[in-house]
């Protein structure tokens, strides 16, 4: 499986590999932003905890959706 992934990456052009790295970084950013919103004790915005949890869950769900879109697009 890992060899298949590396072979797939070698077939891509430099621009496609760069865009793949950028999309993975954006996925990580959304995921960690969602976790940070939920667990940050001194959150700089005045929000009730239930709204912070809802916002964090939405950000984490969006990052997971992005991950599966990228995964399915690069599976071919």
Image (tube, rainbow, N blue to C red):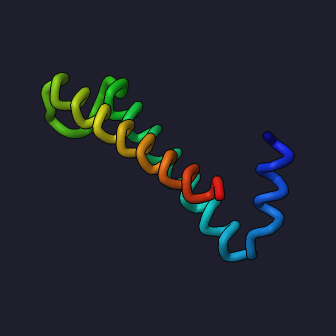
Task: Quadrant for residue 1, please give it.
Answer: top right
**Quadrant of the frame with the C terminus:** bottom right
Task: Tell me where residue 44 appears, x and y as whole percent.
Answer: 25, 38
Residue occupying the point 58% across, 50% down? 71
Does 53 sit left or right of 59 as displayed?
A: left
Residue 56 rendering spot, x and y as whole percentages: 31, 34
So how many labels did they put on this image? 0
Q: Please determine whether, in this image, residue 45 is positioned above or below residue 74.
A: above
What is the x, y in percent for residue 17?
70, 67
Residue 58 falls left or right of residue 46? right
Q: Nearer the viewer, residue 29 or 24?
A: 24
The residue sitting at 25% across, 27% down in the picture is: 53
Give how far across and how far down residue 69 sits, in percent: 48, 52
Q: Quadrant of residue 34?
A: top left
Q: Is residue 7 above or below residue 45?
A: below
* Residue at horizontal 64 percent and vertical 53 percent from the top: 75
Query: In the picture, residue 16 is in which quadrant?
Result: bottom right
Q: Nearer the viewer, residue 10 or 45?
A: 10
* Residue at x 84%, y 57% (from the top left corner): 7
Q: Residue furthest front?
A: 76
Left or right, 7 with reference to 12: right
Q: Nearer the viewer, residue 41 or 12?
A: 12
């Amino acid at each position: 499986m890992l060899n298949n992934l590396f072979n797939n990456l070698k077939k891509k052009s430099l621009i496609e590999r760069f865009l793949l790295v950028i999309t993975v970084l954006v996925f990580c950013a959304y995921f960690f932003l969602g976790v940070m919103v939920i667990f940050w004790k001194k959150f700089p915005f005045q929000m009730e905890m239930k709204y912070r949890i809802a916002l964090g869950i939405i950000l984490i769900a969006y990052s997971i959706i992005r991950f599966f879109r990228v995964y399915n697009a690069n599976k071919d």
